[in-house]
Amino acid sequence: MVEEERKYEVDPGFAVPDLSGCLPDGGRLVELPAVKLTATYYDTPDLRLARAGVSLRHRVGDTEPWTVKLPADAPGVRHEISRTGKRRTPPPELVWLVTAYSRGAELTPAATVRTVRTVLEVRDADDALLVELADDAVSVLDGKTVRSTFREVEVEFKTGDRQLLDRVEAALVAAGATAGGFTPKHVRALGAAAAGPADLPPVDDLPAEPTAADVVTRAVRDDITRILTHEALVRLHAPVGDDDTAVHQMRVGCRRLRSDLRTFRALVDADWAGTLREELKWIAGVLGGARDAEVLRERLRRTATTDPLAPLPDAAVGRIDTALAARHEAALAEVDAAMRSDRYVALVEMLVQAAREPQLTRAAAGPAAQVLPRLVARPWRRLAYGGSGVDGAADLTLDAPDERWHAVRINGKKARYAVDAVAPVVGGGAAKLAKALSKVQNLLGEHQDAAVAADTWQQIAADHPDDHELAVTAGRLVERERTAVRAARADFADAWDRASTPGRTKWLP
């Protein structure tokens, strides 16, 4: 589940104000009896979890006493996963879930806090819980000794209108509460060491006159952050939005990092980059099976409803989806197995170290604006003009085999990633080229997805030769996919012409 809450520091004598004025029409306030909660937080000896904004705790009295909280995209928003289990023995599933942060280090008790909590519920006219306000008096324990105390108020969003949170906050602040940064209880309990920087460095803005090293370091950190911030959601098989998945984002991160290390190979240590690229190729390949199944299942739903005047039999479409679901489940099992392996833990360690200190050559010390354009020119030339048996983008014809279009798509991704990495420095034409290449890639991606889907529908039909309704349905799906292929090919020439204009490419040597 996703937890969204705000925290407020308050003095010991703070009194929760009357929140009646915050209520929606017909709403009511419900005050619950105070409860005592004792939570023990587990971490590595150097507090890797706390410094990364992650927690693993056991709390006495909860139905599912073990809980992991992972950071999400917005302040105060966290993914919360709870499980049952014995006290003093963290469930292996939750230990596995925080691998990207612990990197295999032992997790032991790091802090124990006792909270006396009074909860005030804000409910609507239908008695639905909208907001929960928790007034917490917290004691930090050292054995049975109270080492320190503090008080805070948490306001957690449950459902309804988020503007209600703003009204509650205004009332609390007017009564003396201090709204500030989101600092979890265990971080306050652990002190300065827990508030230190995370092992994964932030992706900082570039300086005014960056070196090539600055740009490469930023690109590497950006790619690794994308990988590691989505990997726990991959383990949970969780989405990251209405139209995106964690598998997709993690795989893109792997591909971008491999591409960036190749584009900037003159600026990075060859052995270091080679080892990292090989391991990224492995995990990206494992993720690929799950991603392909995701794309096909989404494609099936979309293609089947393309023409509402010519609906396809729901039962036959359902049987195709069942076959895809089995593939998806098997692919996710392979992902889980790979991410439980020692090889994967070693890769995570490599990624964190790579983000902290990329292994760069002396050539990276030069000015970015002078060094980088010639490095980007190579993947661009390969996309534009081809080579090693691969067509250039301008050479594609409407009747070329799907495989040739796919080969250009692969080169297009490499060129786009390279341009994306240097656009913040080069600006102007590079930024325009990056935008134009995105449109080119969208067309090539649509082409590839449609072509693969058409082959898949035919294969599934062939696997069920006695299912005539399925065969007819698959045939109709194939025709719709091939129509999409032809449309992508027809639109490609104009998109490529726009991308390859001198105004977008003259910065390339």
Image (cartoon, rainbow, N blue to C red):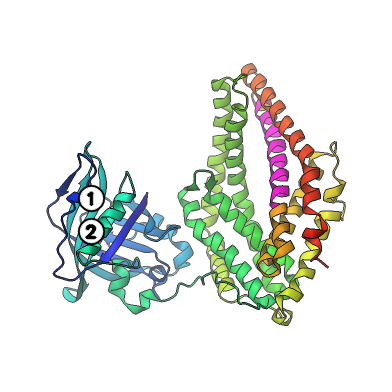
- Would you place residue 443 above or below residue 102 in this image? above
Q: Chief secondary structure of the magenta span?
A: helix
Q: Give the range drawn in magenta.
A: 438-461
Check disc 1 and give the amino acid type: Cys
Q: Is mark 1 on a helix, strand or loop?
A: helix
Please indicate whether residue 103 sits to the left or right of residue 272 in the image: left
How much space separates mark 1 and mark 2, taking CA atoms? 8 Å
Query: Residue 57, which numbered label?
Result: none
Instruction: Name the quarter where the C terminus is drawn.
Output: bottom right
Q: What element carries label 2?
A: helix
Tell me, yes or no, whether the highlighted magenta stretch contains residue 442.
Answer: yes
Pick the front one: 460 or 50: 50
Disc 1 + disc 2, Cβ < 8 Å: yes
Residue 38 visible in this rendered orientation of the protein:
yes
Q: Residue at x 62, y 17 (%)?
A: 469
Q: Mark 2 sits on what residue? A: 171
Labels 1 and 2: the sequence-earlier one: 1
Q: Which residue is drawn at 40% across and 61% down?
A: 75
Residue 265 at what x, y percent from top left? 74, 70
Pick the front one: 390 or 392: 392
Q: Which residue is drawn at 69% across and 26% down?
A: 462
Pick the front one: 438 or 139: 438
- Would you place residue 477 above or below residue 497 in this image? above
Q: Residue at x 72, y 26 (%)?
A: 479
Q: Mark 1 sits on what residue? A: 22
- Would you place residue 312 above or below residue 492 in this image? above
Residue 129 at what x, y percent from top left? 25, 44
